[in-house]
Image (cartoon, grey):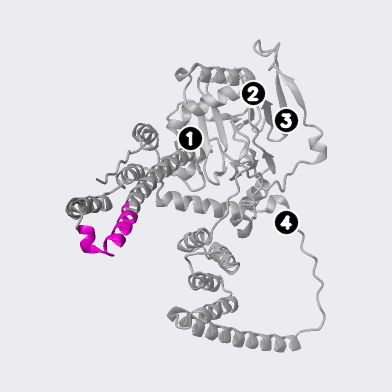
Amino acid sequence: MLSLRMELPYWYLLLLSCLQTLSAHNDFFTSIGQMTDLLYTEKDLVTSLKDYIRAEENKLEQVKRWADKLDSLTATATQDPEGFLGHPVNAFKLMKRLNTEWGDLESLVLSDTTDGFISNLTIQRQYFPTDEDQTGAAKALLRLQDTYRLDANTISTGDLPGVKHKSHMTVEDCYELGKIAYSDVDYYHTELWMAQALKQLDEGEKSTLDKVTVLDYLSYAIYQQGEIERALEYTKRLLELDPEHQRANGNLKYFEFQLEKQKKAAEGEAQKQKERGKRETTEKKKTKPKKKAGFSLIPERKKYEMLCRGEGIRMTPRRESRLFCRYYDNNHNPMYVLAPVKQQDEWDSPYIVRYLDIISDKEIERIKQLAKPRLRRATISNPITGVLETASYRISKSAWLTGYEDPMIERINQRIEDLTGLEMDTAEELQVANYGVGGQYEPHFDFGRKDEPDAFKELGTGNRIATWLFYMSDVSAGGATVFPDVGAAVWPKKGTAVFWYNLFASGEGDYSTRHAACPVLVGNKWVSNKWIHERGQEWRRPCGLTETE
C-alpha cells in the first residue's frame, strides 16, 4: 500500500520570536539595521520552500516507482492475458490493484504538500515590506545616483566603491526604477533607467520584458524633456518591432508635425535675425568674460552634494596649519589626568573637534542592542505647527536611551560631561540613529532660530547650546557630516565623536553650524548624539558680552 510521510519544519517558535520584533516596525527602507531582520525572514522562507520541494519530489518518486512496476507487469500480462490470469494469484492481485491500490495512488497524487510552506508564507507575509518600502528604496537609488554622479550602468553592474557583495540589476529591476520615476513625473530618471533596460536587452540579457514596452516609456520620457527628434528616433525603432502599435503610430505623426513646426519657426527667427543684423552696426561690443561663481554663490543643494562627494572643501593650507591634535584632559579633570583622551581639530570656524577612541566596540554593541527594538522612523519638527512628522529629506530610524535604563548609558553621559564641561542633567537623552537605503538628513540647524520661539518650550531647558555626535560604525562610501555654508566635511570613523557649539556664548545662534548627513552610498551607518541645552550651563559657559563672542 502506498503511503506518504512528510514532516513539517519546526520553524514556528523561531518565526514567532522574530515576528514580535518585526511586527512593531514599518518603513523598513529607513533603517539598514532593521532590514537585516528581513534577510533572516527570507532565509526561513527558503528553508520552508525547500521542505515543500523535497515533499513533492518524494511524492513524484513514489508515483514513478508505481508506474515503472505496472509498466513492466502489464507488458508481460498483455502478451498472454488468459495464461497470465490463469494463475489465481495474478487474478487476485489484479482485483486488489484496481479496487484498492489505484485508489491509494489517486489519494497520493491529490495529497497537498503545500500546507507547511503556505502557512509559513501567510504568517510572514503580513510583516513583509510594503509598496512604500519598495518605492522608498527605489527613490534612494535615484538620490544616490544624483548626489554621487553615478551613471545607470555603474549602479546596474553593482560597481560601487567599497562594496563587498556585488549585485547585478536585471532588466526588470531597471524597468521598475524607470516606472517609479515615471509615476513621479520624473522624466529625467525615467529616461536614464529605461535606456539602461534597453541597453541590457540589446546586449542579449534574457527577460520577460520586451523592447517595445521599454521603448514606449523611453520615447515618451525623452519627448517630455523637449527632445522631439530623439523621441522620434526611438518611436521609429519601436514601430520596426511592432508596426501596429497604436500609440506609437499616433506619436510618430505628432512628433513629425512638431518637428516641422519647430523647423519653420527656426527659419522665421533666422530671417528676422538676418534683417535685424543689416540695420545694426557691424561693430561688435567687447564683453568681459563672466567670472566663475564663487563657492558662496553656489546654491546650498549643490554645495551639499559637492561636499558629499569630497569636492569644494574650503580648508586652505594656511588654515589647516593651525589645526592640531593633542592629548586632552579638560583642565585636569580627575577622570583624565592619568589617561587623557586623543583630541584633534576638524575645523576652525565653527570650531569642530573630534575625540578618537572615545567609545569602545563593546559599548557600541550594547547601545545598538538596546536601541534596535525601539527604532522608529526619525521625525522633524514642523517649523509652522511644531508637530513632529516624517520627512523625505530625513531617511533614518532613531531611538532614545536614558541613563537609568542601563549603567553603561549613564557612564557615557558622564564621559560627555567630563570632556565638555557641560551639564548633562538638562540635556536630551542619548539619541541613536541608523540610516536606511541612501540614508541622509539634508541641511538643517540643531538649534531653534528666532522664528521658532517655541522650538523646545516643552522641555523647559532653553535652546540647544551644543551637539555631541558619536560615530558607531565605519561607512564604506558616503555618509559624511557636511557644513555647506563653510565648506566643511567630517567623515565617519568608528569609535570617534565630534563636538561643536550651536550657540555663541552670548546665546545667539551660530548659523555656520547648519549641517547635513550625506546619503550612505555603501555600508551601514550608526550614530548616536547628545543635544546639550542652555539651562545648567550658566556657570560652566558664562554668557559673552558681544553677539558673536
Decide: marks 2, 4 in contact (CB < 8 A)?
no
Decide: marks 2, 1 in contact (CB < 8 A)?
no
Q: Residue 293 carries which label?
A: 4
Q: Nearer the viewer, residue 353 or 472?
A: 472
417 sits left or right of 372 in the view: right
Above or below, 395 against 99 in this view is above
N-term mark: 2 or 3: 3
Per the rendered image, the range of residues in magenta is 66-85
Decide: marks 1, 3 in contact (CB < 8 A)?
no
Q: Is residue 224 magenta?
A: no
Whole-percent x, y for residue 383 in the image: 47, 43
Report which quarter residue 331 is drawn in.
top right
Amino acid on which disc 1 is placed: Ser
Spatial distance from mark 2 to mark 3, Cα to Cα?
15 Å
Amino acid on which disc 4 is placed: Ala
- Residue beneath label 2, please? 358
- Residue beneath label 1, please? 398
* SS category of the residue bearing label 3: strand
Q: Main secondary structure of the magenta part?
A: helix
Mark 4 against mark 3, which lies toward the viewer?
3
Mark 2 against mark 4, which lies toward the viewer?
2
445 sits left or right of 381 in the view: right
Whole-percent x, y for residue 223 in the image: 54, 74
* Mark 3 neighbour density, 10 Å: few (under 14) some (14–19) many (20 or more): some
